[in-house]
Amino acid sequence: MAAEQIKSVTALPVEGIHVEDRLRDTSEAGVEAIMASIRDLGVMKDPIHVRKVRHQENRLVLMAGAHRLEAAKRLGWDEVPATLWTCNDAFARLMEIDDNLASAELTPLDNAVFLAERKRLYEEEFPETRAGVAGALHKNCATDMMSVAAFATTTAEKFGLSERHVRRMVSAGARITSDEARHLRQAPRPVTLADLQTIGGIPDDDRRAEVIRRMAVGEAKNASDALNAMKAEALGAMIETPDDIMFRKLAGNWRRAGMRAKRRFVAQELTELARLVAEAQAGGGSDD
């Protein structure tokens, strides 16, 4: 994972630093906290880390410190303290991950996403530890989890976590796509590790998407509630009567129709509609 540090700390123009392909967006609370710290201390406590991409005309791309960079922009700084690197994509991503994992503000969702990505990069750096290769080299290993074990140990030591916690987070994060994570971050309630494990255990893509949608818009407080509601709805649909089905289709067509179509329908069926309205007002009516 090659990298060369060009300058330990230097001043770089804020507007010349590009922010691309981040694993998560900045949070308003995180930016505000850094701005408050800068106002109190008069300095930015830690520099950001920037990559000089030489094959792109020395383009400057942020590796770590998105919240610090955004705080500098809002404070009107022309320059920001930065450590300047040349490196490959894997090192740049690892720098972003470790900078975020060292933060105290990560949610379980962010932790899971970052740890799963860190494991993927770990296996790129040490391909012999991937589960398939490990299994071929160690046929007596019943669990075939050499990769996870090695990664969990080194990561737990690095960030002061338990190995069990790292394993659970990696398992959950590996099952969540980047789009799913983006939608889950919109949920009004915090997404828990249990939610992530439940979502990751749903094999059907459409069903997973619906659970995530319900959590994101606040229709369900957690993944289990969303699944239970969907099961209840499916059971109700199974015992619908023919009249229930016809009514649902008729009501759906009416809601979807444009005003012009609705007026045409009323004009054509006015006599029957008037009779039905009169029956409803009288509190009775025939089903004929």
Image: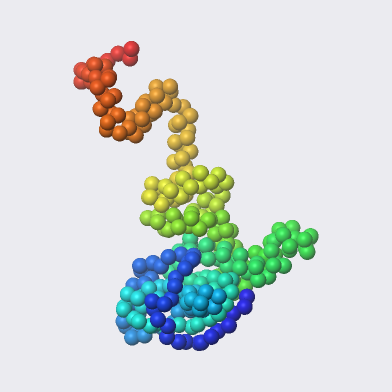
| Residue 217 point in image, percent of width and height | 38, 50
Q: Quadrant of the N terminus?
A: bottom right
Estimate the x, y position of residue 253 in percent, counting from the top left: 36, 30
Drawn side of residue 178 relative to residue 72, left or right: right
Residue 1 visible (yes or no): yes
Query: Which of these two is toward me, 131 or 9?
Result: 9
Query: Which residue is pictured at 51% across the width and 87% down the height?
Result: 7
The answer to whether residue 257 is above or below residue 137 is above
Residue 216 at x, y percent in the picture: 41, 52
Q: Residue at x 73, y 62 (%)?
A: 133
Position of 41 compared to 12: left or right? left
On the image, which quarter does residue 256 sit in? Answer: top left
Number of dots carrying numbers: 0
Colour option used: rainbow
Residue at 52% x, 62% y is 113
Observer able to see residue 189: no
Q: Is residue 197 left or right of residue 218?
A: right
Image quadrant where one finds the C terminus: top left
Q: Residue at x 44, y 31 (%)?
A: 236
Question: Seen in the image, is 140 located left or right of residue 41?
Answer: right
Picture quarter containing residue 155? bottom right
**Which quarter of the picture shows residue 251?**
top left
Above or below, comparing residue 276 to residue 93 in the picture: above
Seen in the picture, residue 200 relative to 103 is either above or below; the reply is: above
Judging depth in this view, the residue of 51 and 140 nearest the camera is 51
Percent coordinates x, y for residue 141 in the rendering: 75, 61
